Image: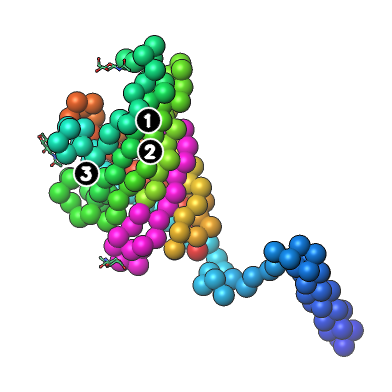
């Protein structure tokens, strides 16, 4: 029994020593305690669902094209165009329903053969315990599919170390006036 403790103590001190050495060698990396960062032991898996409502009309646009497509692709894949977006996130499809945050980001048409977007989006929450936290999405939005999947690449606040995926679905779209887009986010976080 005493031996076990001795071995355990040795292992612990060896581990501590190894970390200290690594720290000394590099001078810029060291271990950190989860509790110090306010992280719980276990990841949670959560499903968020919300909607946003773009306006394309010039006087109150929430999504704007800031770079036009290359002329050759105008009217087909829009290759080369770049848009910026900032919209309220609502809990229901009704655009007058409760606002829980904002989606801010940019999308670029990055395919010469299909209408595909590279989407770089931040979902910033403004309600309850999520107020101030955000989820970052970066991926390929393949508009020819009914439901598109994009990776979650991280987050801030309650979403530090977040991973997961988002599914997006166009509920309504009229390129001249407005859209309603649904997002389902499946996220593993602390
Ligand atoms: C934006 O303007 C259009 C046309 O002027 C109008 O129909 C629409 O309701 C407005 N949208 C918002 C969200 O104010
Ligand atoms: C693309 O087409 C639209 C609509 O026909 C036009 O307004 C716009 O100027 C065109 N853009 C380019 C870069 O050719
Ligand atoms: C969210 O946080 C901001 C900044 O801390 C604060 O001004 C705002 O009142 C908060 N909103 C809610 C709904 O708690």
User: Could you say which is closer to the camera, residue 160 or residue 3?
Assistant: 160
Question: Could you tell me if the residues under marks 2 and 1 are in contact, i.e. CB atoms within 8 Å?
Answer: yes
Residue 181: give x, y in percent of width and height.
28, 38
Find the magenta span and give its range.
Answer: 124-141
Q: In this view, does 112 lie above or below 83?
A: above
> Residue placed farthest to the right in the image?
3
> Residue placed farthest to the top in the image?
72
Q: Name the residue under label 3.
A: 93
N-terminal-most mark, 2 or 1: 1
Q: In this view, does 64 lie to the left or right of 45?
A: left
Question: Could you tell me if the residues under marks 2 and 3 are in contact, i.e. CB atoms within 8 Å?
Answer: no
User: Could you say which is closer to the camera, residue 80 or residue 150?
Assistant: 80
Quadrant for the N terminus, please. bottom right
Report the mark closest to the observer, 2 or 3.
2
Q: Which residue is drawn at 46% across and 22% down?
A: 111
Q: Is mark 1 within 8 Å of ligand 2?
A: no
User: What distance separates the C-alpha of mark 1 from that of mark 3?
Assistant: 26 Å
| Numbered disc 2: secondary structure | strand
Q: Mark 2 points at which residue?
A: 106
Within 10 Å of disc 2 (Cα), the crowding (few <14, some 14-19, many 20+) is many
Q: How is the image coloured?
A: rainbow
Residue 12: give x, y in percent of width and height.
79, 77
Residue 156: give x, y in percent of width and height.
45, 59
Q: Residue 82 carries which label?
A: 1
N-terminal-most mark, 1 or 3: 1
User: What distance separates the C-alpha of mark 2 from that of mark 3?
Assistant: 22 Å
Q: Does the magenta stretch include residue 126?
A: yes
């Amino acid at each position: 029994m005493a031996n076990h403790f001795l071995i355990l103590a040795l292992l612990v001190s060896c581990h501590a020593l190894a970390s200290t050495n690594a720290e000394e060698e590099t001078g810029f990396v060291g271990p950190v305690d989860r509790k110090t960062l306010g992280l719980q032991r276990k990841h949670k898996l959560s499903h968020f669902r919300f909607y946003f409502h773009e306006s394309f009309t010039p006087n109150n646009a929430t999504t704007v094209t800031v770079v036009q497509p290359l002329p050759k692709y105008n009217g087909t894949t829009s290759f080369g165009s770049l848009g910026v977006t900032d919209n309220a996130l609502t809990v229901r499809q009704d655009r007058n329903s409760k606002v829980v945050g904002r989606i801010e980001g940019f999308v670029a048409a990055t395919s010469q053969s299909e209408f595909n977007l590279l989407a770089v989006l931040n979902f910033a929450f403004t309600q309850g315990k999520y107020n101030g936290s955000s989820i970052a999405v970066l991926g390929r939005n393949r508009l020819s599919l009914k439901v598109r999947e994009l990776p979650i690449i991280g987050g801030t606040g309650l979403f530090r170390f977040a991973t997961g995926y988002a599914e997006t679905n166009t509920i309504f779209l009229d390129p001249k006036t407005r859209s309603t887009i649904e997002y389902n986010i499946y996220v593993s976080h602390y």
